[in-house]
Image (cartoon, rainbow, N blue to C red):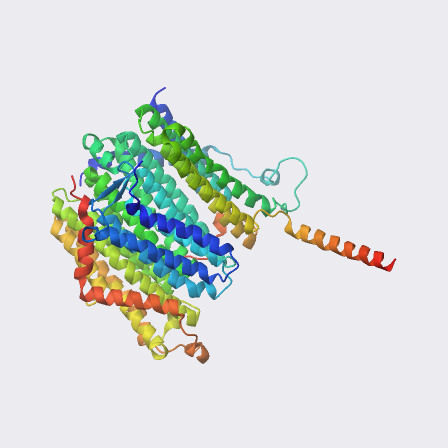
């Protein structure tokens, strides 16, 4: 059997890193080295992603275009490469966020990095999956370790609760997803996405097929925490250790969206009216409910939880707009492009927002908004970065989040038709509501007086550990630069639309 | 034997699982109910595989992966239940209400 | 958007909700609700339980059960390879070898971490007792 090892190199290196972290954990050395090995492994596995991406301009690389492995079930194309890069980068920054946090208390460090890397490996596999089986295995590898990571503060009842809620919802959603997948397999007789798409042409109006598709989408709706399947999200985000929350809200959520993208635009491409209608409703509900509840929050982590639900809704808007019957392949490509671009930018700004929350929490212990008053007076750098990330999440122009919102609206409006326009109007209203609560946090940090209850020595406080500084720097530069030069991210997004009109 | 009989069995087992998940208070029993749902999926997959006469045996392979993943999930679930049991001496799902809207 | 596509889902949901509602309503209408202290007791006969059972299974059983379930079920991947053993030849053996090596690595990890140790506390106590006795007997021997 001939296997293209170059195409699999990121996964192989990451798997070896996972093994190495376990071995290092057993050796009698400082646990800090497990984090170093993890970071090194993530960096090393990023190299083959680059060499695969720039294959045509490299001498040693035999350029075969899209690399198809294992009988259509594993594909390495530009879409999967871009997303692998995002997952590896997200995991890299998550580890940077975790280092100081884990060392500050008695946590089990070796296992933590082992689990985080396993989850990242799952995400990398997921990006290439073009088959129900590999998709399912990848998705479970992403979510499985995160159940344990959510409960990492073992003595804390909130963390325990977060883990159990997340776990129960996670396994139920996996079961629903599998039930849907089994029906899809039964009706089409195929597990590969191309096979399903070819087989589905004649049986679009079979009730069993519709049920299979809807169940599969429901399973993913849990994973991307779309309303009304979002109940676990705020509790888990609040209770889990904050670096884990950052990981969940970026890598784990992005993994769910990648699954949705390949399923909707490849496997179920012929059933656009079914998934379009379902995701239209989910998008409208997620944006509205997520934003309205976020308005009332006083805890910044919980606010970011609801904000991530609402942001998920914005990412679903292009899916929902695609329900318009007359949408041309080019318009569908644009919708696909909009979701991917939003996802890429969201990853950077949300990780940055959580990095700021971790840094402030390091000093003030609490994440209640009242306690954050006057942050600018004693930590001007942190307050500035807080403003950058939160205003970017709100979509204020010179920052990256603005471009994400722009492409999302553009795709919905260019597809046109009553339903798409209506969804765009709902999205605009929600962008306004969103601005209100993001601005509330920024206002508290910049203009409110310092609360009297905080002792003065806490304000001078501890310095930020170097790993966290590095993570903050990376994300700030990304968010600001991408805001001024959106062409970079647009180019990346453009590269990914390969298989949308591939038939 | 027709495929419908297997599908009805699968759907019934899945529904029993959902019922158990929604009504049981003990986390271990919730876990058992989820296992029932996954077993229903396996029945579906293997039945479809048999009746489609799939050359690649996709359904059977899928079922193997479902079994393995289900086992891993049980391991994770038991670990979390143990953690909660150690801290609060019971494993009732309803008692987990520290955080509200 | 053609709503007709959703007809099967709506029908299924209607039947499901209807069935649940009807059976709940029936049991509420038909059942006689007349609780007495005996009926509310966990067991209607035998010794009246005075307190909740305190000691359940020791946690160690759960740990071993967990490890057993995981290592046991991984064998099914060997099964998938075994039914096509001859077609895959040495490449298949190598692939399965890697898989088993990973399992062994995990086992070593679990072992070194002490998850397989049974009754560590009691064994420690036993060891100290033995050491004390040994010391004492040596002292007695030296004195003699």
Is A301 displayed left or right of A53 in the figure? right
Q: Residue at x 25, y 53 (%)?
A: A51
Of residue C1 and residue A3, the one placed in the foreground of this image is A3
Q: Residue at x 24, y 34 (%)?
A: A195
The answer to which quarter of the image holds residue A183 is top left
Of residue A377 and residue A280, the one placed in the foreground of this image is A377
Q: Position of residue C36 (x, y in %)?
A: 59, 39
Question: Can residue B53 be seen in this snapshot?
Answer: yes
Is A300 displayed left or right of A311 in the figure? right
**Furthest-right residue in this view:** C144
**Furthest-front residue in this view:** A60
Q: Residue at x 43, y 68 (%)?
A: A366
Looking at the rendered image, the quarter that the N terminus of chain A falls into is: top left
Of residue A482 and residue C18, the one placed in the foreground of this image is A482
Number of numbered discs present?
A: 0
Of residue A162 and residue A66, the one placed in the foreground of this image is A66
Task: Establish if A434 lies above or below C5.
Answer: below
Q: Position of residue C87 (x, y in %)?
A: 36, 29
Task: Establish if A292 lies above or below A456.
Answer: above
Is A220 displayed left or right of A197 in the figure? right
Question: Can residue A327 be seen in this snapshot?
Answer: no
Looking at the rendered image, the quarter that the C terminus of chain A falls into is: top left
Q: Position of residue A132 (x, y in %)?
A: 31, 38
């Amino acid at each position: 059997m001939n296997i293209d090892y170059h195409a699999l190199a990121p996964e192989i290196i990451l798997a070896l890193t996972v093994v190495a972290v376990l071995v290092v954990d057993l050796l009698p050395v400082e646990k800090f080295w497990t984090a170093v090995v993890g970071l090194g492994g993530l960096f090393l596995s990023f190299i083959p992603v680059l060499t695969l991406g720039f294959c045509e301009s490299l001498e040693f690389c035999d350029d075969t275009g899209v690399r198809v492995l294992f009988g259509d079930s594993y594909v390495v194309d530009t879409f999967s490469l871009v997303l692998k890069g995002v997952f590896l980068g997200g995991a890299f920054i998550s580890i940077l966020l975790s280092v100081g946090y884990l060392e500050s208390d008695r946590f089990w460090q070796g296992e933590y990095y082992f689990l985080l890397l396993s989850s990242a490996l799952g995400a990398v596999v997921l990006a290439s999956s073009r088959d129900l089986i590999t998709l399912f295995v990848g998705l479970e590898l992403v979510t499985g370790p995160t159940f344990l990571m959510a409960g990492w503060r073992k003595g804390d009842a909130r963390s325990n609760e977060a883990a159990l809620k997340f776990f129960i919802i996670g396994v139920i959603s996996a079961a629903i997803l599998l039930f849907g997948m089994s029906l899809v397999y039964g009706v089409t007789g195929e597990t590969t996405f191309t096979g399903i798409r070819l087989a589905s042409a004649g049986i679009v109006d079979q009730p069993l097929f519709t049920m299979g598709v809807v169940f599969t989408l429901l399973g993913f709706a849990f994973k991307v925490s779309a309303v009304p399947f979002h109940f676990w999200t705020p509790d888990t985000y609040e209770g889990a250790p904050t670096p884990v929350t950052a990981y969940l809200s970026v890598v784990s959520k992005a993994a769910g969206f990648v699954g949705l993208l390949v399923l909707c635009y490849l496997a179920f491409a012929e059933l656009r009216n079914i998934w379009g209608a379902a995701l239209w409703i989910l998008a409208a509900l997620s944006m509205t409910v997520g934003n309205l509840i976020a308005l009332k929050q006083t805890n910044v982590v919980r606010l970011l939880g609801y904000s991530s639900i609402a942001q998920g809704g914005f990412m679903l808007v292009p899916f929902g707009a695609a329900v318009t019957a007359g949408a041309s392949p080019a318009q569908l490509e644009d919708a696909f492009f909009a979701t991917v671009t939003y996802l890429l930018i969201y990853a950077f700004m949300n990780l940055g927002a959580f990095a700021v929350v971790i840094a402030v929490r390091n000093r003030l212990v609490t994440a209640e908004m009242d306690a954050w008053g006057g942050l600018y007076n004693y930590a001007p750098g942190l307050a500035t970065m807080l403003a950058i990330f939160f205003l970017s999440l709100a979509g204020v122009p010179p920052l990256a989040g603005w471009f994400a919102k722009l492409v999302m609206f553009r795709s919905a409006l260019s597809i046109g038709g009553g339903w798409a326009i209506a969804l765009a109007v709902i999205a605009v209203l929600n962008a306004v509501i969103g601005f209100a609560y993001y601005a509330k946090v920024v206002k508290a940090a910049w203009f409110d007086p310092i609360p009297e209850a905080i002792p003065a020595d806490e304000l001078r406080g501890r310095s930020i550990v170097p790993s966290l500084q590095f993570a903050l720097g990376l994300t700030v530069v990304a968010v600001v630069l991408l805001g001024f030069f959106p062409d970079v991210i647009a180019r990346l997004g453009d590269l990914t639309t390969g298989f949308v009109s591939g038939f | 034997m027709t495929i419908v009989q297997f599908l009805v069995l699968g759907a019934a087992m899945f529904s029993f699982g959902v019922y158990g998940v929604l009504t049981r208070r003990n986390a271990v029993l919730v876990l058992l109910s989820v296992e029932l749902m996954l077993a229903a999926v396996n029945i579906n997959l293997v039945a479809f595989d048999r009746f489609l006469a799939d050359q690649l045996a996709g359904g059977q392979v899928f079922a193997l992966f479902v079994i393995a993943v289900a086992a891993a999930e049980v391991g994770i679930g038991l670990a979390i239940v143990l953690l909660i049991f150690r801290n609060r001496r019971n494993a009732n799902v309803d008692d987990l209400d520290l955080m509200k809207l | 958007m053609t709503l007709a596509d959703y007809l099967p889902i709506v029908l299924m949901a209607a039947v499901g909700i209807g069935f649940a509602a009807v059976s709940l309503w029936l049991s509420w209408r038909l059942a006689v609700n007349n609780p007495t202290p005996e009926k509310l007791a966990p067991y209607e006969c035998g010794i009246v339980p005075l307190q909740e059972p305190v000691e359940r299974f020791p946690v160690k059983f759960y740990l071993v059960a967990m490890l057993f379930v995981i290592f046991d079920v991984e064998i099914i991947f060997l099964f998938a390879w075994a039914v096509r053993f001859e077609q895959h030849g040495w490449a298949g053996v190598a692939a399965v070898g890697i898989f088993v090596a990973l399992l062994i690595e995990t086992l070593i990890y679990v072992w070194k971490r002490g998850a397989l140790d049974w009754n560590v506390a009691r064994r420690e106590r036993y060891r100290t007792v033995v050491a004390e006795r040994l010391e004492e007997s040596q002292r007695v021997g030296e004195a003699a």
